[in-house]
Image: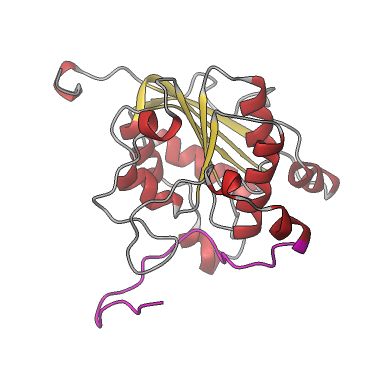
Amino acid sequence: MTAPPRGVRREVVSFARRDGRVHPKIARAWTARHAALLVHPDRLDRDASLHPAWRFDAVAAFGRVAPLVVEIGSGTGESLVAAAANDPDRNYLGVEVYRPGVAKTVIRADRLGLGNLLVLPADAAAFLRTGLPRESVTELRVFFPDPWPKAKHHKRRLVTAAFLADASRVLVDGGVVRIATDWDGYAAQMLRAAAATPELGNPHDGFSPRFEGREMTRFERKGIAAGRSVKDLFLVRRPRRASEKLPG
């Protein structure tokens, strides 16, 4: 891996690691058919980075025009694959950096013959900031992001006011953000971040009921078993003023 130029600081990222042992059974099952379900962006110096000039072209990637749902931190694909299978009229893009999770998601999607699901192995914050065109996403989902519970690591948390501002840029008018966490402190931070993002409305004036369309994953069950309560947040992109509209 090429080191960054001297004097250039690494950007703080929300993920801890990308490496992990891919189970031999999964490695043996991998084919060119699975590789076709991955998005291959232009990179910078890190293999999870995105070149700032690269843009995701959903129509070219999926081969059709359809509403786009993006799940950030899609893990092993439990919720993403279930959602795509139950909603064939929309395109689903998972954004995940953990290699074994990416592999499991792709194999699950291929096993079901899903043609409306792709996975992008990339830094999600950079993807929202530069990789997605304006007004291109119908729904953005962030389910159980790393809570970084230690105070010294809070700066690495993904969901901030800056993150939600980037989300508001890529959402269509009326597009939604769905977030869930089982860490109370992070939930409170998310609520403050939402309040500081005027482009996003909060119909529930606080936390929302659990999203019924979210598959109950092993991760969520584990948090509940540990005695943590799950908080959901549902935000809606307010209509843009005429001056904010894309030309044409």
The residue located at (36%, 71%) in the rendering is 10
Q: Nearer the viewer, residue 73 or 231?
A: 73
Rendering colour mode? secondary structure
Q: Is residue 134 left or right of residue 204?
A: left
209 is higher (above) or lower (below) than 24: above
Q: Where's residue 163, x and y in %?
A: 40, 45
Count of marks overlaid on the render: 0
Q: Which residues are magenta?
A: 1-24
Overall secondary structure of the magenta stretch? loop
Q: Where's residue 29, x and y in %?
A: 72, 52
89 is higher (above) or lower (below) than 135: above
Q: Nearer the viewer, residue 44 or 31?
A: 31
The residue located at (40%, 67%) in the rendering is 46
Q: Is residue 111 magenta?
A: no
Q: Is residue 226 left or right of residue 170?
A: right
Q: Where's residue 126, x and y in %?
A: 37, 52
Q: Where's residue 208, x and y in %?
A: 61, 25
The residue located at (76%, 46%) in the rendering is 228
- Quadrant including the C terminus: top left
Q: Is residue 19 left or right of residue 225?
A: left
Residue 231 in sight in this render? no
Q: Nearer the viewer, residue 66 or 14?
A: 66
| Rendering quarter of residue 123 | bottom left
Residue 20 in sight in this render? yes
Q: Residue furthest bottom?
A: 6
Q: Is residue 158 left or right of residue 223?
A: left
The residue located at (62%, 32%) in the rendering is 232
Q: Is residue 10 magenta?
A: yes
Q: Nearer the viewer, residue 10 or 229?
A: 10
